[in-house]
């Protein structure tokens, strides 16, 4: 045997000895690893519920070291990265899950939900629809799709999705509730009442449904029915100050100012550090013409929450109303100053706020009236100080 051949054989033997020997796991070992994977996933899920995301992430990753084909931890890790505002990793883990089980609808739900949070509504819609091709019975995909249509102001398409769900799952409480909420937001209050009533028949102990029905009755002007719903809940939770405010608001709409005042005062005592009771009370005071005390309440509310748009709007309304009074009395400088104050209050409402369009309109109105005041004052020989 020549030297070259011997050398080659030696090298082959060395490589063979050095190569790692992959041990094939037994069925029992595989099962044991799968159990450990599920144990760590369960622990991670508990940490996730507690919003301890670091501990949850550690356990989910440990779960995958025992079973890298385990689908659920990938979705859970994606959700953690979404909470941590890391969309790249969140998306990455969704795709990892999809590679393992491409027809599992949970991955499509997680990815579409992520796109929704990222405000990439076109992609979200596409993923929801793709997920439904694999599983046309997965409720969450329909609800997510309906939400995209609502956000995109495609209400007819949203309604079609809800109607399809209601036919498929007529007793699903989540669908029934969201459908009723949709009707309420559309201003279809009687239909909302009917839908909430249907839910309450099936789930009479669901207080949230009864409260929402009370809200719909309030919008319809069915004050007796609204009070009955609110009072039934309040009998069980007498310190629910938000519900007390709603009862006070019903009295306010009825013109029962004394009863409304009692409820608003009670709510203020129960929640002294929340601005909302002061807002309701200020609204009552404005209707009673007590603008000075209303201003005091609104300023107290803003001291608690300076970004409270409704407080700034109401203060703007008060200044505008006082400006109108002074204008009629030909107190031009005082009127001009008050309209100027009103404009400053309205300007504090951000573009994204629901009150922005109202504030924008009132700013234009106040500026127009301010111009008229300056003209009238000029004719009277009065120079308005800016």
Image (cartoon, grey):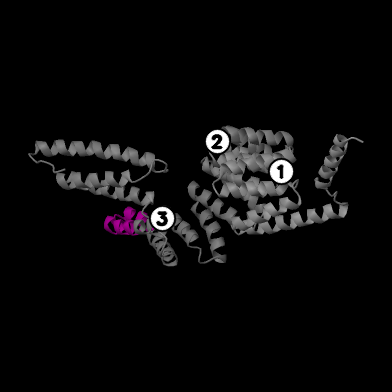
Q: Is residue 295 magenta?
A: yes
Distance between mark 3 and mark 2 Cα atoms? 42 Å
Q: Is residue 205 visible?
A: no
Q: Which quadrant holds residue 112?
A: top right
Instruction: Residue at 72%, 53% (x, y): give it.
Output: 63
Q: Would residue 306 appear left or right of 110 to someone viewing this image?
A: left
Q: Is residue 223 magenta?
A: no
* Residue 252 image label: 3
What type of secondary structure mainly makes up the magenta span? helix
Give the answer, above or below, for where 337 lies relative to 145.
Answer: below
Q: Would residue 17 appear left or right of 112 to someone viewing this image?
A: right
Viewer-nearest residue: 75 or 317: 75
Crowding at label 2, few (<14), some or many (≥20) Cα neighbours within 10 Å? Answer: some
Q: Earlier in the sequence, mark 2 or mark 1?
A: 2
The residue where tag 1 is placed is: 169
* Magenta residues (range): 280-300
Q: Earlier in the sequence, mark 1 or mark 3?
A: 1
Give the answer, above or below, for where 177 lies relative to 294.
Answer: above
| In this view, the mark in front (3 or 2) | 2
The quadrant of the rendering that contains the N terminus is top right
Instruction: Residue at 38%, 49% (x, y): give it.
Output: 309
| In this view, the mark in front (2 or 1) | 2
Name the spot of residue 26 as percent of width and height, x first.
Answer: 87, 52
């Amino acid at each position: 045997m020549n030297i070259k051949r011997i050398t080659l054989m030696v090298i082959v033997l060395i490589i063979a000895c050095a190569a790692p020997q992959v041990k094939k796991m037994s069925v029992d070992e595989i099962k044991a690893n799968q159990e450990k994977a599920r144990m760590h996933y369960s622990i991670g899920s508990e940490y996730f519920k507690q919003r301890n995301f670091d501990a949850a992430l550690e356990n989910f990753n440990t779960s995958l070291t025992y079973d890298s084909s385990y689908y659920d931890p990938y979705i859970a890790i994606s959700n953690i990265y979404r909470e941590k505002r890391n969309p790249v990793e969140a998306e990455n883990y969704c795709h990892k899950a999809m590679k393992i089980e491409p027809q599992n609808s949970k991955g499509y739900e997680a990815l579409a939900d992520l796109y929704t949070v990222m405000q990439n509504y076109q992609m979200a819609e596409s993923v929801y629809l793709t997920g439904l091709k694999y599983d046309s019975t997965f409720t969450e995909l329909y609800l997510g799709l309906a939400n995209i249509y609502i956000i995109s102001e495609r209400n007819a398409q949203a309604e079609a999705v809800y109607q399809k769900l209601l036919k498929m799952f007529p007793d699903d409480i989540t669908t029934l509730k969201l459908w009723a909420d949709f009707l309420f937001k559309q201003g279809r209050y009687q239909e909302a009442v009917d839908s909430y009533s249907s839910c309450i028949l099936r789930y009479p102990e669901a207080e949230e449904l009864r409260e929402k029905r009370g809200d719909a009755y309030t919008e319809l002007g069915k004050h007796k029915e609204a009070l009955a719903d609110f009072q039934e809940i309040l009998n069980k939770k007498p310190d629910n100050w938000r519900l007390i405010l709603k009862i006070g608001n019903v009295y306010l709409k009825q013109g029962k100012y004394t009863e409304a005042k009692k409820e608003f005062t009670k709510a203020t005592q129960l929640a002294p550090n929340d601005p909302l009771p002061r807002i309701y009370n200020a609204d009552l005071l404005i209707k009673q013409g007590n603008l000075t005390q209303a201003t005091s309440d609104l300023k107290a509310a803003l001291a608690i929450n300076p970004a409270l748009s409704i407080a700034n709007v109401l203060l703007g309304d008060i200044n505008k109303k006082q400006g109108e009074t002074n204008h009629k009395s030909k107190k031009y400088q005082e009127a001009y100053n008050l309209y100027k104050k009103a404009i400053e209050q309205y300007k504090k409402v951000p573009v994204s706020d629901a009150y922005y369009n109202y504030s924008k309109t009132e700013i234009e109105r106040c500026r127009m009236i301010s111009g008229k005041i300056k003209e009238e004052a000029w004719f009277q020989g009065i120079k308005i100080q800016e």
